[in-house]
Amino acid sequence: MELKEYVNKSVLCWLATVGEDMAPNVSPKEIFTLLDEDTLLIANIASPISERNIIANARVCVSLIDVFEQRGFKLKGTAEVIEPNSDIGEEYLRSIRTIADESYPVKNIFVIKIESKSKIMAPSYFLFPETTPDSQIKNALTTYQVSHYQHKR
């Protein structure tokens, strides 16, 4: 599994943050892209708690999975909030705009410097040796009554 592959085929990622009060927060994010192997960009569309928490505590964790294959990555690192009208913010916004057009109001961009990454997968892969990504997809399509599945992003 390659990180770029899972970033491209994950519909959502989940950003975990902790604020000054030490209360955890997990929030789904729809618009994200891998800038390079060490940098994940997440568009802040409507996440005031995530933004406030990152400003207070830069340590974050991001999980992204293909929900049908039931595997993906967990990323840990530090985040900063970058304004899109700054020089670097404009560059990051161009990367975001390759996956989301102007109809998405990007307030600012969460820039995650990836310090560690690890593969994550459903327990079925460990419990049942015959489990494959294809068998997971087939089971998920049946379970969720989905008639068609195609990776696109």
Image: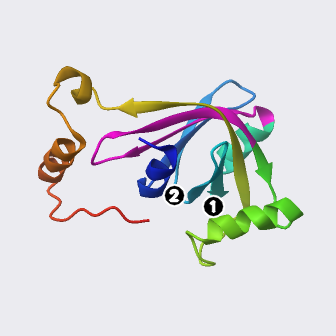
| Badge 1: residue crowd in 10 Å (few <14, some 14–19, many ≥20) | some
Residue 88 quadrant:
bottom right
Q: Marks 1 and 2, how far apart in space?
A: 9 Å
Q: Quadrant of the N terminus?
A: top left
Q: Which residue is found at the position 74% from the left and 43% from the top?
A: 52
Residue furthest to the bottom in view is: 102
Secondary-structure class at tag 2: loop
Secondary-structure class at tag 1: loop
Q: Is residue 53 left or right of residue 65?
A: right
Give the percent coordinates (x, y) of residue 136.
Answer: 20, 42
**What are the residue bounds of the magenta stretch?**
56-79
Circle 1 residue: 45
Residue 21 in the image: above or below residue 1? above
Look at the numbered discs 1 and 2 and tell me whether their residues touch, using CB distance below 8 Å: yes
Frontmost of labels 1 and 2 is: 2
The answer to whether one can see residue 116 in this image is: yes
Q: Quadrant of the C terminus?
A: bottom left
